[in-house]
Amino acid sequence: MSAPTDVRRSRADVSKHDVSQHDASKHDVSTHTADQHTATAAPPTPVPARRSVPPQSPDVPALLPGSDVGTALPQQLVTRDRDRARRRRASVQVPNVRPRSESRAHSPVMVLIVLVATLGVMAYAVFLLDPANRGDFLPYGLVIVAESVLVGQALLSMWTILSGGADPRDFAFHQTQDTLFDRDAISHDGLADQPHRWPMHVRGQQVEVDVFITVYGEELSKIAATVQAAVAMRGEHRTWVLDDGRSDEVQALAAELGARYVRRLSSHGAKAGNINHALTLAKGDYYAVFDADFVPAPDFLFETVPFFADDSIAFVQTPQTYGNLHNLVSRGAGYMQTVFYKFIQPGRNRFNAAFCVGTNVIFRRSAIDDIGGMHTDSKSEDVWTSLMLHERGWKSVFIPMTLAVGDAPETIEGFTKQQLRWATGGFEILLTHFPFNPKHRLTMDQRLQYLVTASFYLTGIVPGLLLLVPPLEIYFDLRPMNLSIGAGEWVLFYLGFYFTQVLLAFYALGSFRYETLLLAAVSFPIYASALWNVLCGKEQAWHVTGAGRGRTPSPFNFIVPQVLVFVFLTLTSVVAVWRDLGNGQLTLATAWNITNTLVFAAFIVAAFREQARNRVADRAQTPGEAVRPVTPLAQASASPLRTTVVRPDTLEPQRAAIAGVAMQDGHRA
């Protein structure tokens, strides 16, 4: 697959000079509360004729007549004010991330911990591979395979973390952001109090932006909050609700909130097909994508669109930040992503390997057209689309700034389906699109980064392999290490590896999160199932994280393997204790097995508690409050909307999955 010559020729000759200190405040930033996220958007009004006057860089005060502080426009800052503005902006730009942990990113202490952790990894690897320490073949082989995966991932992750820290916002970004809004045109057209209608300009040209909200059976209240916030974002854009759930309630909601509504007659291609379908209708220069449960901040476009001054940028990705960390599953799932978004993704910027995560992202339309649309052959369309763009020579940017807040999975069902989908996508790349295949046009750095991504979920299978080691010693007297090695020496090297990993996570998060370790230890059946599905070519069904679909199923429907493992470990612990009492000493294998048993016991208790909460919620739910289930195509009721069948040969991009479109024209948002 050759790189697009037209893209390479049109790339702007932008200065690469590092001007991270140029990160000045372009406007007053107000704190956004939950109420502001759900505030009703300004009433739509007719759009005035487009102005061809290029944006100017005014030297007048930022506030327009009749506007308040909340709608202040960005202004050029003089040099002596830049440092002061940068410090003020940094203190408020990420209101949903704890300042304590945010300030630690890439600090000298953080770098020191990473270096120490790297030494711990290498020392542990040398200890394991020393022939003098080798034990019985089977348990030793399990340990070597499992720890090799962990050591490889750890070393590559450390390398990525140490590569981060640079601000991706260069001079071209700041220059474009300074002139994104034309103050004179806004004042002339009377739009000062309607920030969602302010025309945006990139390098002197007015640009059009579409905002896609993908919907598939989520709760109406969550959809409403997201649509309201999207419609109200600063900068002229058109908001589209892409409803694969075919819900009349969602259709009415979109019309009420001033968004356009699109309904397909088929769910082909799942989320990627939904977006490709919308691309045949929307014609903006750029388009943003939000899941139905991610509420965007008012400044999302202001902070992302200026990156497109560089013609080689295909997409700009922002973090997934969660606002519902209130139970074991949501906290464990949410904090699992913290290190990734705070350290790993920023480090990938250095190698042009930051990838899309499916939401809170904005794409250049021409880049997606260049690869034939969003990738529809996998349920992990985000990372596959990123890979295809990078192979075509496009660039990506990740900015570690919270610009949308959403929901982590709150139930065992939601967590299981989410992780199964993500892991399946990673294994698909590893087994069907191996990054080091010479046919793929990637740099060596990109190959390594995508190898880390594709093989990451192998680390999720590792706990399952290590669980077998203590029972092999308890039942068959097979040991992974030589009997001449003392327990103290083993513990020293073992803790040198694992303790430094925990210390790194502790420092990054600002606290110890046992929920993350617990979920990581008990989730290996999910990742083993994903690997098996890919090996067998089994299609992975699409599921929505946290979507309500009537009566809640029991969490035990999704953790049968974990329950069986718990029973096995419990019986093994009883046998081990009985054996050790007879021998007069407690062995390391017994202690290890009991620890594993307690971890699974804690997870089983969490499942019982979730089941009890579900029963209470189901009893309290009245018929009028029940969530409307997704309407299957065969049962879809007749809609009063106009239905248009689109000919396949008229589609753009080429991969658009079209069966038909039912849409209602809304107001310009």
Image (cartoon, rainbow, N blue to C red):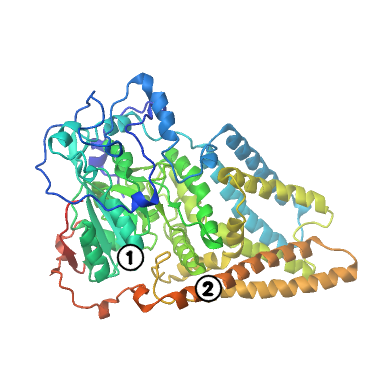
Residue at the extreme bottom: 635
Image position of 70 with respect to 526: above or below: above
Can residue 377 be spotted in the picture? no
- Count neighbours of disc 1 (C-alpha within 10 A) and say few if under 14, some if 14 to 19, many if 20 or more: some
The location of residue 71, given as percent across then percent down, is: 27, 39
Q: Is residue 359 left or right of residue 664?
A: right
Could you say which is closer to the camera, residue 156 or residue 56? 56
Q: Which amino acid type is marked by label 2?
A: Pro
Which quadrant of the figure has residue 517? bottom right
Which disc number belongs to residue 555? 2
Picture quadrant where residue 633 is located: bottom left
Q: Is residue 219 above or below residue 442?
A: below
Question: Percent x, y for residue 446?
Answer: 43, 44
* Circle 1: residue type: Leu
Task: Determine whether the residue tagged by mark 2 lies in a helix, strand or loop.
Answer: helix
> What whole-number distance in Å separates the C-alpha atoms at marks 1 and 2?
24 Å
Q: Are marks 1 and 2 in contact (CB under 8 Å)?
A: no
Q: Nearer the viewer, residue 509 or 424?
A: 509
Left or right of 462: which side holds 423? left
Crowd band around label 2 with a 10 angstrom C-alpha radius: few (<14), some (14–19), many (20+): many
In the rendered image, the residue lying farthest to the top is: 80
Q: Which mark is residue 220?
A: 1
**Sequence order check: which comes first, mark 1 or mark 2?**
1
| Secondary structure beneath label 1 | helix
- Residue 224 placement (x, y as % from top left): 31, 60
